[in-house]
Image (spheres, coloured by chain):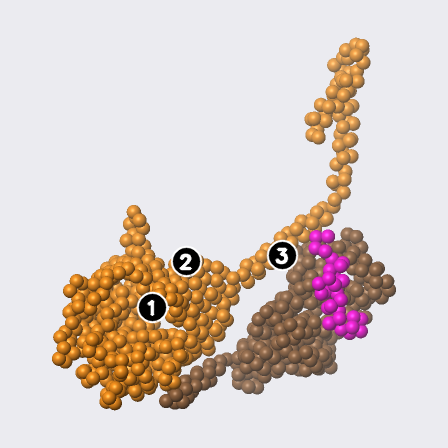
Amino acid sequence: MKIRHSLLLSALVLAFGAAHAADKTLLNVSYDPTRELYADVDRAFAAQWKRQTGETLTIRASHGGSGKQARAVIDGLEADVVTLALSADIDAIADKGKLLPANWQSRLPHNSAPYASTIVFLVRKGNPKKIHDWDDLAKPGIGVITPNPKTSGGARWNYLAAWAWASREYRDGGKVLDFLTRLFKNVPVLDTGARGATTTFVERGIGDVLIAWENEALLTLDEADTRAGFEIVVPSISIKAEPPVAWVDRNVARHGTRKQAEAYLRFLYSPQGQALAAKHFYRPAEPDKVADKAALARFPAVDQVTIDGAFGGWKKAQAEHFADGGFFDRIYRPGS
Amino acid sequence: MTRPTRLGLAIALALSTLPAHAADPTTQQLLARIAALEQRLAAVEAANAAPVATVAPDELDQRLRVVERRQELDAEADAAKAASAPALSLNDNGLSVKSAAGDFEVKLRGLVQADARHFGGDTSAAQTDTFLFRRIRPTLEGSFGKLVGFRLTPEFAGDSATIVDAYVDLKFDPRATVRIGKLKGPIGLERLQSGGATAFIERGFPTELAPNRDLGVQLQGELAGGGLSYAAGVFNGAPDGRDAATTNPDGDFELAARVFAEPWKNSANALSGLGFGIAASHGDKHGSGNNFLPRYRTPGQVQFFNYRSTVLADGEHLRVSPQAYYYGGRLGLLGEYISSRQEVRAANGTRADLENTAWQVTAGYVLTGEDASYRGVLKPSNAFTLGGEGWGAFEVVGRYGRLDIDHDAFPLFADPNVASSAARSWGIGLNWYLNANVKLVANYARTAFDAAPGATARDDEDIVFTRAQFSF
């Protein structure tokens, strides 16, 4: 009697568990300026997946400041994949959330960065304040728009690019800090994300220069409403920004979406994925796969440092510059 | 300093500089001096105003835009914060805290029932008239994410606090939820009604044959848009009408299941309130005493049948209960039948397979026009207001029921001191719902008994029970 009853119940539970298997949905938690890119990627991949497997895949997206998004995932936002602005944010998900292995970056080509960008200046048409390089941003009377490095991955790239220029220019730590202090003193508004900073500069008309992702600046010039009012200034030195991607192992295991999540990210490296990256002004990691050479020609030559070469990698840069009490806290005080 | 004030001061100064011995100036001279002073003052004011004019309009515009953008960002941050903040609500359903996403929720609910009970004077089963708390039950329930739900209900109305419900739900799907813990066994239709929603103060005879709370695991769910519900579980095994022991005393389990259909639930027709189903339980019981064998009670909660203390439950226990209700507008009908068959063994080794049965029909009609329902009158149209026009909702109820003991129980297995062979009871009642939270109840019930073979029937039981109920 005991065994018979237990078996009956077990069979019922298993039967309903199997019946519970539902349509697949992927949640891509991404950073601020990738809205347009992933809207295209999601459509293209879902169609390809349907053709290849017959399975209907729904892809949902969440966008926001990269650091903020990483914290949301750590706090329980059940991302199947994360496509964030910098590897430190995914490292945080691995370290603090234990949601994916520490070696996540080695699982996909190019350190899991299917595309790259760099940091440029967007200025008002005619460049009325004569902004040509980083030192112009620290001059009195210049309004500089950049988001908050505490919440925005793009802002951290901006900050580090400025640091890289100052290090090469001054070769003196005190002068570097002084330069960045003066630069951030010229920042009237700190948005939480890169898209918000673009809104502040482009739509609200605040400031003289936006330190921006190259893709965000090119997007502004590509839009009919805004292209007439702005122009891009390429600084003498910038930084190679490689936004990485990863599937979140614990979440995909829970959702049964590992296969779909990995295929989705590998799609970014396909010719179609690389072409979409170029279309949305990201520099493809494998430009040879992009047939439309005109799309590649839009990217100007820029002298770029790398995060590993100039700062010893993201973990070190994060700890030294952006952790509580780091250099950023020393050079910037809200309201100062 | 305003212009007239400055001008006045300048005139006063000018006048004060005039030599005291000088002859009075002419009007023309004075007017000339005033004109000169006005020219000098205008020059001074122009000089003072110059710094303000150095702020460029563009700079002022930028300052204004920055202030506006900061306000915009603050508003966005406040909105984001508000959107992620849990929502606290307090209303007639109790207190609840719900996460912004809605998948985490904790609710505090409660049920308090204070009774005044009067027994008719000629009953042979002596019961004292009394006030008592029938139920004092706070309930903490809610969900932790989409998967996990829970309920915890202690009981403070007895001599010591006990746990009434304590279970966790794993909500895989509305069609499949696994409930684990202490819960009502899925047999009796009236038993499955909330204690605050029953038509009468005490449940009828079929509930005496159905299990009460039991410990186990149950798979349950709703199919066909809620038109068909089911529950099936494995339990320790509770005796008729009572809770199961805190552990499984004989090591045998009981399988219980129920299927209930409301085929027209989602239709707007006269049959939308019709529900019917069948429930059954099956298991073995081996042992004597209250953990294994029942003691049947009247609606006045007086025992009228018990087994001898030497009798053992010894084998199969099978319950079957067809059941139905109908709620259409003001009218409510509930009927159920239950058979409980238990293999027993007397002290001398004699065995019997005793089948006790019970049934009842309960009807209710809401005089004030609100809808009757399985959950009672949920909310009066016009809540009672002191000195106002609202009187709440009134519902009249009536019930007839019967419980029959298997004749083979006499005389070997039945306790001769508490051994009626059948009980028949009818009752009427009035439920006054003052508002969604307060209900006043008055019941009258008369129960007649059939005597065991060779014995004399006990006197009829007359009861007048009243109740004040507060629930949220």
Identity, as a three-letter code, of the amino acid under mark 1: Ser
Q: Which chain is orange?
A: B
Tell me if mark 2 has few (under 14), some (14-19) or many (20+) residues whose alpha carbon lies within 10 angstroms of its own: few
Task: Report whether A66 appears left or right of B264.
Answer: right
Q: Which residue is mark 2?
A: B91
Q: Closer to the observer: label 3 or label 1? A: 1
Magenta part of the chain: A308-336
Q: Which residue is mark 3?
A: B73
- In this view, B278 is above or below B1: below
Indicate which disc residue B194 carries: 1
Residue A315 sits inside the magenta stretch: yes
How far apart, in angstroms, are the residues tagged by discs 3 and 1?
50 Å
Residue B205: x percent and y percent?
24, 73
Q: Secondary structure at mark 1?
A: loop
Output the chain of dot 3: B
Residue B406: x percent and y percent?
20, 82
Q: Which chain is brown?
A: A
Answer yes or no: is residue B402 visible. Answer: no
Residue B281 sits inside the magenta stretch: no
Between residues A270 and B255, which one lies in front from this camera angle?
A: B255
Answer yes or no: is residue A269 visible. Answer: yes
Tell me if mark 1 has few (under 14), some (14-19) or many (20+) residues whose alpha carbon lies within 10 angstroms of its own: few
Magenta: main secondary structure equals: helix
Sequence-earlier tag: 2 or 1: 2
Sequence-earlier tag: 3 or 1: 3
How far apart, in angstroms, are the residues tagged by discs 2 and 3?
34 Å
